[in-house]
Amino acid sequence: MAILSDIILYPIKSCAGIHLREAVLTRSGLMSEHVFDREWMVVDAQGRFLTQREHPRMALIVPSIKATTLELRAPGMLRLEIELGLPHPQLAPMLEVQVWDDSVRAYDCDDVTATWFSNAIGVPCRLVRFHPDVVRATSTKWTDGVAAATMFADGYPVLIAGSASLDDVNDKLRAAGREALPMNRFRPNLVIGDIGAFEEDYAAFLQFGATVLTPVKPCSRCPIPSVDQATGVPGPDPLDVMHGYRAKPELDGAICFGMNAIVTDGGDERIVVGQDIGFELAF
């Protein structure tokens, strides 16, 4: 039977993740201590999102969840604490921000926070927080018309990857004279063990108690897997080795690793590392 090997929450889009022993699987993505996955996002002066694609030092911004704050650390910086309580809806400043093709309203964090992030990343920027009244719908092209929503994730609320899939990629990297990579290069939310390499690509569903998680779209890969998440320094891109067998014709030849997924039944399910998962292939 498949098992849940790891849970990773990314409070701030494109910054470091938090490995968790347990979390809540909601229809908007993972949540722990009332902190949601990709609930915050860094934007430029025009309100457009920033990522490690252009700013690999974002990997070095490390969050941790405290009792009432999200604590942030970065090399050479004093720690920053952000209040977890939502701001007053009538008093908090708002920004219109852009994440891919979506334009949404978001809370604007304060100038002190903006200065901290600008210094940490090296470009003028601000931190914004997803507004709870906003619904950012995912594309139904890959969901057979099933509606879903996410916060500031690229496209869908949950990204899954199989541990055997990474083993397979690393075997090919070693055969090409390259170093093996850790799973954090691919930034999944849920790592699934005890399934075959790339079986997640063909899963009909994953069952977590009363909640059903359905993989809907292969995750096409950008240059972020080349970024060492411990140093923020880009290195050799594994996609050149993966190109020979991980290009998906249904995505115009994009190189894919992992599957984007949505909750199709249930939700608000407590999940724990090591638990058994119902897993069924679609054929």
Image (cartoon, rainbow, N blue to C red):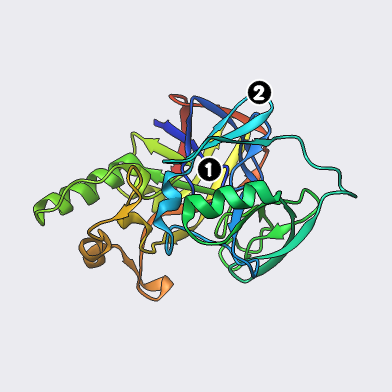
In the image, residue 31 sits, relative to residue 147, either above or below, namely: above
Residue depicted at 43% across the width and 64% down the height = 54
Q: In this view, does 88 lie to the left or right of 210?
A: right
Dot 1: within a 10 Å radius of its alpha carbon, few (fewer than 14), some, or many (20 or more) residues? many
From the viewer's side, name the closer residue of 120 and 153. Answer: 120
Residue depicted at 63% across the width and 47% down the height = 113
Badge 2 marks a residue whose secondary structure is loop
In the image, residue 224 sits, relative to residue 70, either above or below, namely: below
**Quadrant in which the N terminus appears:** top left
Report the amino acid beneath label 1: Tyr
Report the amino acid beneath label 2: Ala
From the viewer's side, name the closer residue of 65 and 24. Answer: 65
In the image, residue 188 sits, relative to residue 255, either above or below, namely: above
Q: In which quarter of the image is residue 269?
A: top right
Badge 1 marks a residue whose secondary structure is loop
Q: Position of residue 237 (x, y in %)?
A: 26, 61
Dot 2: within a 10 Å radius of its alpha carbon, few (fewer than 14), some, or many (20 or more) residues? few
In the image, residue 221 sits, relative to residue 91, either above or below, namely: below
Which residue is tagged 2?
67
Q: Is residue 258 left or right of residue 114?
A: left
Residue depicted at 16% across the width and 48% down the height = 179
State the count of labels.
2
C-alpha distance separating marks 1 and 2: 17 Å
Which residue is tagged 1?
10
From the viewer's side, name the closer residue of 283 and 183. Answer: 183
Q: Position of residue 19 (x, y in %)?
A: 46, 32
From the viewer's side, name the closer residue of 8 and 261. Answer: 8
Q: Position of residue 190 (x, y in %)?
A: 46, 39
